[in-house]
Amino acid sequence: MEKILSVMFGFILLLACFVVAAPAEWGIALNHETKECINFWPGDEFSSNKLPEGFEFYTPMKYNPIVFEIGIGSCEVESNSYNDYSACCEQLGYFFIEDVEKEESFVLVVSVILGLVFILALIIYFIKKER
């Protein structure tokens, strides 16, 4: 049992060396049918935000000023807009929606649960080993 846990722990440490996570960049999401527009952030290594149904996500093509080039046109906002692209929505002729409910990613929830189970198994193992 000790050997199996040691191998599992070593494997996880090895995998951790190759994982590189970075936050996704903010952008806008457009629903072309309803002409709605939202500020959207896909997430980072700790969270994942699901794009609402019917929306397409776009990231800036240029910075300083921030420029979005989309098939229906382009828009521009100041670089210090703090991820508020409502002006861009207006330039494109879309209605800006402020709050959109975010759903937790199923994969993220399962990953956290499995990680906690693994840590609990290690704790139990080391407690039993000391006895």
Image (cartoon, rainbow, N blue to C red):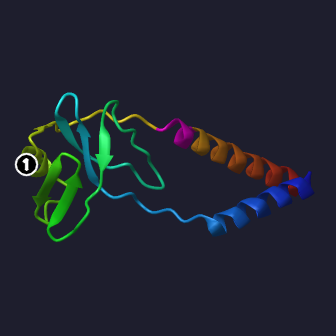
Q: Is residue 74 left or right of residue 20?
A: left
Secondary structure that dominates the magenta span: helix
Residues 65 and 72: in front is: 72
Q: Residue at x 53, y 43 (%)?
A: 108
Residue 131: in sight, yes or no?
Answer: no
Count of numbered marks: 1
**Residue, disc 1:** 91
Q: Residue at x 22, y 34 (%)?
A: 32
What secondary structure is found at the residue carrying circle 1?
helix
Residue 58: in sight, yes or no?
Answer: yes
Residue 100: within the magenta? no
- The crowd level at tag 1 (other Cα within 10 Å; few <14, some 14-19, many 20+) is some
* Residue 53 found in image quarter: top left
Q: Could you tell me residue 126's position as x and y percent? A: 81, 55
Q: Check the image and report above or below for 104 versus 68.
A: above
Q: Residue at x 15, y 50 (%)?
A: 73
Q: Is residue 80 left or right of residue 60?
A: left
Q: Check the image and report above or below for 59 versus 17.
A: above
* Residue 24 found in image quarter: bottom left
Magenta segment, which residues?
105-109
Disc 1 marks a residue whose amino acid type is Gln
Residue 108: within the magenta? yes
Q: Could you tell me residue 62's position as x and y percent? A: 23, 67
Q: Check the image and report above or below for 110 versus 74.
A: above
Q: Could you tell me residue 125's position as x and y percent? A: 82, 51
Q: Check the image and report above or below for 107 versus 14.
A: above
Q: Is residue 125 left or right of residue 17?
A: right
Residues 53 and 45: in front is: 53
Q: Residue at x 13, y 60 (%)?
A: 81
* Residue 97 found in image quarter: top left
